[in-house]
Image: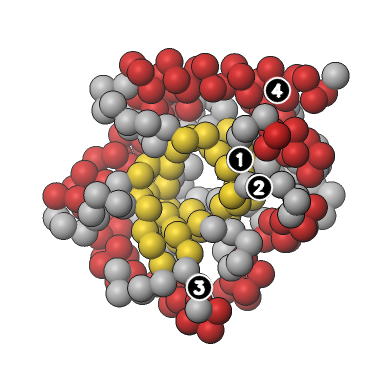
Amino acid sequence: MWDTEIRTNLDDIRTRVDVAAAASPYGQSVQVLLATKTQPAEKIRVALEHGFTLIGENRVQELVAKFDELADIAHESHLIGPLQKNKVNHTLGRASCIQSIDDPGLAEKIQRRLDVLDSTVEYFVQVNTSREDSKSGVAPEAAAELVRALAPLDRMRLRGLMTIGLPGETPDQIRPSYAALRTLRDQLHADGLLDETSLELSMGMSGDFELAISEGATMVRVGSSVFGARPKPTI
Ligand SMILES: *Cc1c(COP(=O)(O)O)cnc(C)c1O
C-alpha cells in the first residue's frame, strides 16, 4: 500500500539521518524537512501522522491550498521556493519560516506586512553556492552585506543559511557547494554578523543528504525519497 511505503521510507530516512549525524565531525543535530511540492495532502498527512511534522512548499499557491487541507493536524510549514513580492500576504500567517530570502527589498516588504499583522516570521538567507545563473540566492561574497541589511528588521528572525547546491553526479562535484555554505556561515559568525541562534545550515536533498550532513547540515530537505517520483503539478 502507498501509505505503508511512505512510512517505511520515513523510517529509513530517519535511520540514515541519525547514522550520518553520529558520524559528522560537527556534532550537530539534524532536522528533517519534507519537501512536499506536487504531493497531495493525503500523502503528506500520512507523514505528519508518522511524526514528521516539518514540511516545505516551493510555490505559494500550493502552500495556501495545503495549509487549508491540513489545518486539522499539527505541523509547521516553510516556504523553500522563491517568493514574489505580490505573494507576501498569502505566505505570512501560513509559513512560519521563509528559507529563500535573497533580497533586501523583499525582506522590507515582509517586515512592513508583519507590522500590520503584529506578527513575526523566521527566515534563512538563501545563498547561491553553486553560482549557477538559474539559481536564486545571494552570491556568497554578497551575503555579509545582505545579512547586515536585514539585521534591523525586528519582526524577522534569522535562523541561518540555506542552499540548493550543485546537482552533481559525484560527491566530489557536490561537496564543495555544501562546504562553501558552512565556511560562509563560520566567517559571518566570526565577523559578528551571526549569533548562536542564527547558525543553522539548510542543505541536502534525497540524493545527497548524508553528504550534506557530513558538511554540517542542520536541516535536510527530502522529497522524492519519501514520496517517490513527483507527479506533474496539478495547480
Ligand atoms: C524539491 C526540493 C527538495 C527535495 O528534493 P528531492 O530530490 O525530491 O529530495 C529540496 N529543496 C528544495 C528547494 C526543493 O525544491
Dot 3 alpha-carbon crowd within 10 angstroms: few under 14, some 14 to 19, many 20 or more: few
Q: CA distance from mark 1 to mark 2?
A: 7 Å
Residue 135's place in the image compared with 35, above or below, is below
Pointer 1 with pointer 2, Cβ within 8 A: yes
Q: Secondary structure at mark 2?
A: loop
Q: Is residue 81 left or right of residue 178?
A: right
Q: Amino acid at mark 2?
A: Ala
Picture coordinates of residue 193 (x, y %)?
Answer: 21, 59
What colouring method underlies this structural image? Answer: secondary structure
Q: Is mark 1 within 8 Å of ligand 1?
A: no
Q: Earlier in the sequence, mark 3 or mark 4?
A: 4
Q: CA distance from mark 2 to mark 3?
A: 20 Å
Q: Which residue is mark 4?
A: 7
Q: Secondary structure at mark 4?
A: helix
Pointer 2 with pointer 3, Cβ within 8 A: no
Picture coordinates of residue 105 (x, y %)?
Answer: 44, 76
State which mark lies toward you, 2 or 4.
Answer: 2
- Nearer the observer, 79 or 127: 79
Q: Which residue is mark 3?
A: 119
Q: Is mark 4 within 8 Å of ligand 1?
A: no
Residue 77's place in the image compared with 54, above or below, is below
Pointer 3 with pointer 1, Cβ within 8 A: no
Q: Secondary structure at mark 3?
A: loop
- Nearer the observer, 122 or 102: 122
Q: Amino acid at mark 1?
A: Thr
Q: Which residue is mark 2?
A: 74
Pointer 2 with pointer 4, Cβ within 8 A: no
Q: Is residue 22 left or right of residue 165?
A: left
